[in-house]
Image (cartoon, helix red, strand yellow):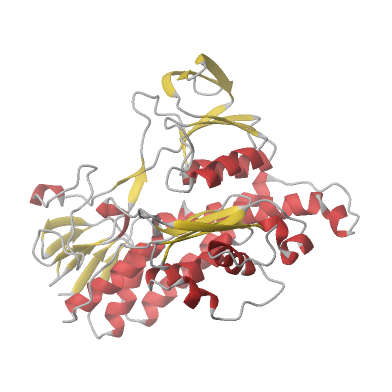
Amino acid sequence: MYDLFIIGAGPGGYTAAVLAAKKGLKVGIAEAQGLGGTCTNRGCIPTKAYIESVNLFTRIKNASRFGIEVEMPALSLAALVRRKERIVSRLAKGIELLLKNHAVDLYPKAAEVIDPGTVRIDGRTIQTANLLVATGSVPKPVPGAAPQLWTSDDVFALEKTPASLIIIGGGVIGCEMAHIFSSLGTKVTVIEALDRILLTEDPEMASGLVKIMRQVDFITGARILNIDGAGPCRVSVAAPGGTRTLEAEHVLACIGRMPSLPPGLKGLEPALRDNGGLEVDEYMQTTLPHVYAVGDVTGVHMFAYAASKAAAVVIDHITGGGRRMSFDNIPSIVFTDPEIASVGSVSEGCSKGTFPVSALGRARTMETHEGFATVYADPAGRIKRISIMAPHATELIAWASLAVDRGLSVEEFLHPHYTHPTLTEILKEAAEDLVGMSVHKA
């Protein structure tokens, strides 16, 4: 009998397990596809491992700009796979050690839900006072397309770089994959059904990335008519300029992810969203008694960091607290080159200030000049949104997120000292531009 049993050991699941154990609960957790879930094994970590490698590869090729002469470097996809597997293995072992050190019972098997207080694992029945579903998501299939299309789950096992690749979907995953494979020398075409890529980011950020990624062919406002072949492939698309037929060695589907419910749960008839995700309240409770859900399985806000935060809310609620989950001001991040990050939303009457990367002293020492930051404030002077396209934007967004979430005024945002020369100055200068006080903007 457990106080809490968790299905899924991704960022939401294992975080909940450790926090629950720290509060004295007896905890069990089941994971059949690798500790760390999609994030560690097939998503965030493998993607960023590849991106760090290709970014370093690009910098080495441009070493002469730093006064360093090197022979032409070579990059092996097979070596990237081995590096990725080493990183994933270490992280998974770290999660296993965390669970062991906190006396969490680990079941490396799939779990079936029998009722809100009962699960079955490999023929064994387990009772629990509370159940947390954290089973994540799987890639969405392209409607009507052949099943042999690659997904983001497939690419990290490749040991040979494709000569050409068509990517269906110009969202975060599609753009990151385009960055990886174009950097490896693949001829990449991105097909996006909407009229621009990265719909959740500022239009200027999206159009700026298209200009920077000159080696990638972006086709927007396009509809897939037909896909023939299993490699090479022929893809017919209806685009604004007319119908086109594209050819590539392979096709990679990156049109998003969909919730993955554990066996047996759907038969208990929990309330579901239109996309199949579990409906939850502000405490992350489903409509089934004592059954909670966090992460991608809820069908919204599919970020590892949102899942981890929601896990803390669940444990607080189970142990008698009153903490509520807020999905306001969740940062969005894109690991392209340059990186893109944003937080908050723009309301009516907002004004904005901008500042270019090219005017930063630190950026010049890094031999980079692409990108900018934008700070938006409402008529009362409260910061509502910050968008960044710059080196290390995914790190800079943490300070921006605090400012937006706490509703800082521009004056409060500018009150601390910003060190020089650093990339953080782009936020200061953009905020100063908003009030007409930027010293370094021409």
**Is residue 359 something that shows in the picture?**
yes
In the image shown, does 216 or 261 lie closer to the viewer? 216
* For residue 10, above or below residue 203: below
* For residue 356, above or below residue 233: below
Residue at 46% in and 55% down: 41
* For residue 365, above or below residue 263: below
Residue at 38% in and 67% down: 380
Residue at 57% in and 66% down: 427
In the displayed structure image, the side of residue 106 where residue 388 appears, left or right: right
Horizontal and vertical percent for residue 130?
15, 70
Quarter of the C terminus within the rendering: bottom right
Residue at 10% in and 58% down: 287
Horizontal and vertical percent for residue 428?
59, 69
Horizontal and vertical percent for residue 370?
68, 51
Horizontal and vertical percent for residue 249?
59, 26
Quarter of the N terminus within the rendering: bottom left
In the image shown, does 389 or 411 lie closer to the viewer? 411
In the image shown, does 405 or 59 lie closer to the viewer? 405
* Image-quadrant location for residue 210: top right
In the image shown, does 1 or 288 lie closer to the viewer? 288
**Is residue 156 something that shows in the picture?**
no
**Total tally of numbered discs in the picture:** 0
In the displayed structure image, the side of residue 299 where residue 376 appears, left or right: right
In the displayed structure image, the side of residue 342 where residue 283 appears, left or right: left
* Image-quadrant location for residue 101: bottom left
In the displayed structure image, the side of residue 13 where residue 286 appears, left or right: left
